[in-house]
Each structure stands twice: as structure tokens, then as C-alpha cells.
Image (cartoon, rainbow, N blue to C red):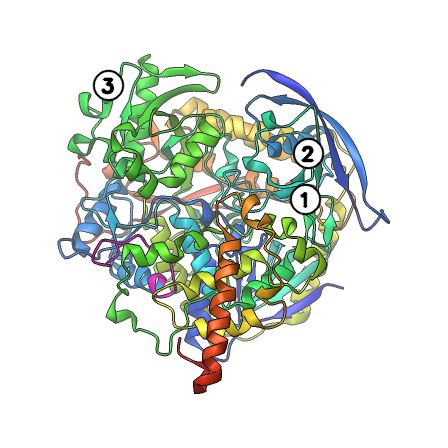
Amino acid sequence: MVETHRHDVVIVGGGAAGLRAAIAAVEADPNITVALVSKVYPMRSHTVSAEGGAAAVTREDDSFEMHGYDTVKGSDFLGDQDVIEYFVEQAPKELTLLEHWGCPWSRNEDGSVATRAFGGMSIKRTWYAADKVGFHMLHALFQHSMRFDRIVRYDEQFVTRLLIDDGQVRGVVALDIRQGTMRAFLGRSVILCTGGGGKIFPFTTNGNIKTGDGMALAYRAGVALKDMEFVQYHPTGLPGTGILITEATRGEGAYLKNKDGERFLVTRDYGVGSKAELGPRDLISRAMVQEFEAGRGFSGSYGEYLHLDLTHLGEEKINQRLPMVRELAKVYGGVDPVYEPIPVRPVVHYMMGGVDTDIDTATQLPGLYAAGETACVSLNGANRLGSNSLTECLVFGARSGEQALQFSKGADDGNERAVRAQAEEEQARIDQLRGKVKGGEKLARLRVDMNKTLESGCGVYRQEDSMQQTVRDIAQIKGRFADLALEDKSKVFNTELVSALELHNMLEIAEVVANSAASRKESRGAHTRRDAPTRDDQNCLYHTLCFFDPAGPRIEKKDVTLGTWVPEERKY
Amino acid sequence: MSDVQIKKFVVTRFDPDKDEVPRTDTFEVPCQSDWMVLDALNFIKDQLDGSLSYRWSCRMAVCGSCGMNVDGAPTLTCKSPLSSYGDTVEVTPLSNFPVIRDLVVELDGFMEKLKAVKPWIIRAKEKAVEEGPYRQSPEELEDFKQFSLCINCMLCYAACPVVGNEPDFIGPAAIALGYRYNLDSRDEGASERNAIFRGEGSVYSCSFANECSEVCPENVDPAAAINQAKLSGLVDWAASLVLPRGGKD
């Protein structure tokens, strides 16, 4: 018998977006309760790893118009302009709330919040707390959320399925990782805030938990995933581990140099103009790959790399503004950036795509909402600007909390028996998978094969034949998943079972990434094809929608919302 | 990629469905010279025994998931190079916590203690968002900043001799995080928290062992927070004797 819990709103994921959604919902109505269902203790969520900052217009010499234009241009004109306008207008309020809730933002001498430069931003508008911004935001949100008894946490619950009845979402069913049993969390609305899925790639800044769970849940339930071909490579990851070295290093003045000691972003034409190291991530990652191809990279035991040089910033500034970078470089890169450059290479960082939502964070499935990296509200288009995503989690997390609550108030509980029956079915499916010894495939092997083909087909540069190969490879690996053998039969904290379920989710979204990529016949933002190197607004100014279909992913198109800003050549 | 050295890992195993008491398994792992302890555990999980259970995520020392005892000492396994260990490495679950399975411990007690110290900004009157941010000087930020760096990894609880004997002791991380708000210029809740610090599981249980600060992978100094909390708790308590309404914040 599946244990059942009922709340007004069920939130899946306890990172910045999920916590913000939960707080927004309980603040909007003193009589409701929210379930915060997370596969980890919330403070372990991957928001914790964000480093550089959160953007908002707060200076007198800045404007919504400027933040909006920077974001539209950064998105290579694929961002929806109504969403972008709403975002820039809400951003200052959201960062201020975080300030009121105790986030230790770095300060100017006069006590105002300090701002720093970031890639693709035309002015210093990024708030920061040294270089642990995600960590501080997450802990401030989590600790603040503890004020509210009506946010009921269910930690270490892995959601495996959305419960749907009569065309409406009715809750979720989750594996209680500690008990090994299933629990149903019923609510009249559900918000997915489970983050991205960078772990489909072999070399990523993402933590182990970033397996695209919410995207896969929505996709299987018939909701489209949007713009999944756009995968952001961050220019500066540590070789080997992929650990992120924040863009704030360059915001504070660091240089990228090739093996000849040349600041190639200044000396060569890579389209970043006078922005140099503060160009947007897609352009800089491509420039770095071109440097490798021209033989101007260093070669090391983990492949080619370039130098991120902070030595001219001085120890005091590095200690004050970038203490974590110094620590990470020392511990994981073996260099002290006060004295030596840091070896770096482009690394998978962020998924611009996600669960298709409208500006209110609503999906096409009534009652289902999504926010944060899981969602694609179309703020980021084809390339996200650094420091917009933490703010996105706040702005659209809050929006989703309010909207989902409103939906919940107007909805009924539905047919609880039908929903419980689905939960029981799910219990049977999970019990079958646990410790399934019969099979010829190993989990780690399937994961590695998936990682490899994604990188070769959907990396920084792409082309038709390799993308098609990846499409075929993923389909084949999905087939092999059915022959997976597992060893762990235990119910209690069976992480092998969780990993198998996560791999299943990753294969689902990997297939969507590959198919979406192969379908876009142009280069835009992070999607760059050698065989179609230019942007084609005539034919390709659209969002890619990918739907689940038993016969294989089905691609459709959706209009981009234009407005104030007319698409133009993207030059810096 | 680099030189490979075989090391032996002696790992605690415990599955409440099968085991009455914990046992150990030994694994031989070909370790690369730049690996952390966590990398070896991941090798075991992927290649040798898929049933080994432990938590990890960020592998960059900020999510706080992967704390374990390594050769008896509380350790963040993603931040501890194998090069600093010998040919045999012993990995056991963090001390002073109930073990759920293998290397996984239960943190619910900590979560309750954290909530108990009210780790949020308390104001007599909350500022409206329209009024904008509070002013806080860099010096005022510095007053509490280091205590806000706690990643909740629980190494300090595993190291603390008092937590082992007095399970109700609020403990280093929760005290540091509560006290962090007392020191925040935006906060007015010090007297409320000081009353908690003086109450059950109080700060006065602390025996000055200083182990918490020594094991902290983020260089937070919870022992300093506890000592300061003791003092301000006393001052506050004394003030409450002479002033009605519990003294001023």
C-alpha cells in the first residue's frame, strides 16, 4: 500500500527555484500547505555550485532596456521578448528580497550592494557574495524557508512519475530512498524545479544529481521539451574534473591566453569585439576550440587547455572577490592563481532548453508548472548570459509558486482512487527494477557510452552526420537499457536503483537533445553547425518542441515572441 | 591521467535488511595520483560493487554531501587527495549519527537543531521590499561572514566529543549558523536565539575541545561562535534579570 500525503501544491526539487516557489506559495495564502519533495536534502541542491553572481538592474546608470537588450542579444534573438521584459522588471525586487532574507551580498564602502561585470552584460549589474553566490543564495533561501511550518519537507524522495487523471496533474509518486517504498504526494498542482541534466555529457560542471529528472517526467507525460539543442559550454572548466572556474574571474579582469601567451580574444577576430574576455559564453567557447584546432592550445593529460590568467589581479583582490576560485584551483587544479595561470577548457554547464512553459510557468498539462533550469520559459533562447540564471530561479520560481497556488484553488482533488492505482502500478514497476540481476548490461557502461556519443555529436561544433550518428547511438543505448543488470536488492538507500532511474531519465533527455539538434538546420547561439555556419532568421527563427512518441521523438515548431528588439546581426 | 597505484579500501558495510551489525568489505582500487578519496569510492561503485551506498554530488567541496570518516578522521571525501593516505585506506560512516546504510548517515536530527536556532532574519518590523536593501558596511558583513560559510557537511558533529555523549547538544554547525544571524546587522533576534542557546542542549555543554573548528573543510570556526554565544547568552540573561521584556536585541 502506497503511503499518501496531500498538500495544496507539490513542488519537486529544493534548489533555488523550488524553495522560492514554496515561499511564494505559503506567503500568498496563510491557509495552505506545500510539499517540498527533493531527492536530496535541499541544501545539497546544485544551486549550491553556482559561483559568479545574479543580475538585476539596480544602478542608476543602468536600465531595464539595457538588461533586456543584452539578454535578447545574448540569446541570439531566440528569447521570448515578453518573458525577458517581465524578467528584467522583476529581477531587482527578487534580489532585494534575498537581501532582506539574509543573503550575505558583498558590499560597497557605503553599505550598498556591490555589482560586478559579467559576460555579455553591458554594465556592472551582477550582485555577488564573493564567488559563492549560489551557495549563499541557496542557504539563505533554505534557512528562510524554515520559518514556515507550512512548507513540509520530504527529503530524499525520488519522484518517478507524475500522477495524471482526467487530463490534469494530480500529484507525483516518489521512491522514498531511505525506506525503499513508494509515497504518493497528491496536490491540485505540481511544480517541477529539478534543475538541468548536464550529466548526460562526460565533461560537465554539473554535480552528480543533475540528471534531468523533471524534464523526463514532463516529457513522458506528454509535455514538450523546448529548445533542447541549446547546451551551454562554459569557457572555463578545470581539465579532468570539469569543476567550474567562474566567469567572475574575467568579470574581475582575468585574461584568457593561448600557449604563445597571446590574449587571442583581443588579437584575433572571434566576434567578441571590445568585450574581449567578457564576451558571451557561446562565442568564447568556440574561440577556444578554434585555438585548439589551430595548434595554439596546451596539451595535457586531460586533453587540450588554455590559460586563465589572474596573476595581475593581485593576492588581495583574489582573496576578497574570488576566494573559492583560489581554493578550487589549488585543490583541484594544482595551481595557485595568485602566481600561476589556471588551466581551463570549455565544459558543459547549462541547458537553455527544458520543459516548455508559458510566461506564467504553466505547461500544456493543466496543473503542471516548471521553473529554473528544468523549465524553458524562453528567457535564455539559444545562449544564456552568465548571472541571469540565478535570478531566473527567483523570478520564475516565485511566479510558479503564485500561479500553481492559484490553479490549485480553482481545481478539485480529482479521482483519488484512480490516482492511487497509478501509484500502486509504479510501486510494482520499481520493485521489478530493484536488483534485477538478469541482464547483460552494466550501468556504468551505458552511462559512459551515452556520454561519449553526446559529446561527439552535440558538442561545441556539430554537423549532420555526427548528430545523426548520436541519434542512432542513443536509440541503441536505450534499447540496451532494457537488458540492464543490477546487483543491489536491498530496499534501504539503494543508490544503484536511483542511479538506474536517473540513467533512464538521462537517456530520455539525451535523445531529445540529439533529435532537436539534428532538426535545426542553422547555427544560432550554442547550436553551431559546421555545415550550416550562419543564422537563418528566414527559416529558423522558431522554438523547437520535442514530444514523446512511442515511435520516437516528434519535433514541432513554436513561434518566438518578438517585440521591442528586431533581430539583427549579433556583433559585439 | 597519471601514475596508477593500487590501494586497499576497507569500507564499512551495513544493510539493516540483512546485517545485525556493521561489517567490512575490502576492495583493491587502481588509484590515479590526482584522485580524491571520493574518486576511489566511485570506482568501487562503478566497477566492483554496485551496492555500495554513500552520498555525493558536487565533487567541489560545496554541497556538503560526501562527509565520511577516513582513517578514523571526519573528512570531506571529495576534497581529500588519496596521495595523503597510505596503501590501505579505511572508510567508515561519520560518527555520532545513526547509520542508515553503509556510509550513509541520518541528518534529520541536525535539520531539527538547525531549525530550532531560527536561522533566519528576525525583525520587529519587516522592511518592505519597495524600501530597497538594507545598508550593511563591508565591516558589518565581515562580522558574520565566516559563520555563513558552513556547508552543513556534519564533520564537526562527527568530531565533537560532546555530541557523542549528549545527543541533544545543539552542536557546532547549528550554533554557528544561529549565531551568524545574531551578528548580522540586519537582524534583531539575538535575545530569542540566546534563550535557545541557554536552553536544552545548550551552548554551555561545549567542553572547549575545539575539534569542530579543526575538522571544518571550509575554515569556519564554530568553536569561536560557541564561545561568543556563551558569553552573549550570559550577558543577555543577566540583562533580562534587570530589564523587563527580556532585554533589548
Query: Disc 2 residue type?
Result: Lys
Q: Nearer the viewer, residue A96 or B219?
A: B219
Tag 2, which secondary structure? helix
Q: Is residue A30 above or below residue A564?
A: below
Observer able to see residue A176: no
Residue pushed farthest bottom? B244
Q: Which residues are magenta?
A: A98-113
Chain that bears disc 3: A
Q: Position of residue A44 (x, y in %)?
A: 53, 50
Instruction: Report if residue A110 lies within the magenta region.
Output: yes
Q: Nearer the viewer, residue A48 or A232?
A: A48
Q: Which residue is label 3 attached to?
A: A262
**Total marks in image:** 3
Q: Is residue A454 above or below residue A419?
A: above
The reply to whether discs 1 and 2 touch (Cβ–Cβ < 8 Å) is: yes
Chain that bears disc 2: B
